[in-house]
Amino acid sequence: MLRFIGLVVLLALSFGFGYLWGKQPTNNLEQTVKDFSRNMVDTTLGIERDLHRRQRLVDAKARIVQAKAELFNRNTTDAESELAEAVNSLEAATRGGKQIDPQAQVRELTGRIRELRLELSLGKKVSSAKLDEIQKELDILLRK
């Protein structure tokens, strides 16, 4: 009889420990899945923000190239409007982004483009070398 009671206690203890051990990984699994899904959403949103920022930088670069072509064709009013659109694209790229070093570079480029646009509106001659420099800096920003 003592063996039987010992066996029942042993089975009860092993069942209890098994139940607790089986319950623990479920909580860990649920927490792991929650953490994984949260990380996935954060990563996806980060990728989306970066994609939108890059798209705006590419748009600005396209506007700079178009402004260079307009200057080559001596259409200063069209070049001015292209530079204004480039400024708009760069300002959109800085909105809602992380506060990191490329933001300062983008703001500096925006200021330089505004200066060139002002020079064009005043009737001054703008060299395409300045636009080439801005285009190269945009290329550097796109690589980051």
Image (cartoon, rainbow, N blue to C red):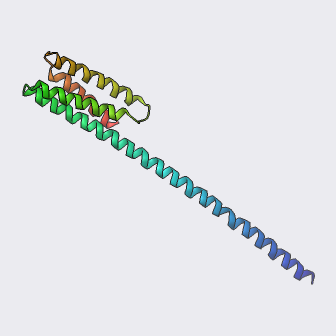
Name, please, the residue furthest toward the left: 73
**What residue is rendered at 92% in x and 81% in y?**
2
In this view, 92 is above or below 105 = below
Residue drawn at point x = 19 percent, y = 17 percent: 119
Location of the N terminus (image quadrant): bottom right
Please state the horizontal and vertical placement of residue 64, each as a whole percent of the image: 20, 31
Rendering quarter of residue 109: top left
Report whether 125 appears left or right of 50.
left
Question: Which residue is drawn at the image coordinates 11% and 26% (left, top)?
Answer: 71
The reply, left or right, for residue 41 in relation to residue 138 is right
Question: In which quadrant of the rendered image does the C terminus lie?
Answer: top left
Q: x%, y% of residue 19?
A: 73, 69
Residue 17 position, x and y percent, is: 76, 68
Along the viewing direction, whichever of 23 and 85 lies nearer the viewer: 85
User: Where is residue 18 drawn, in percent x and y?
Assistant: 73, 70
Query: Which residue occupies 81% across, 74% down?
Result: 12
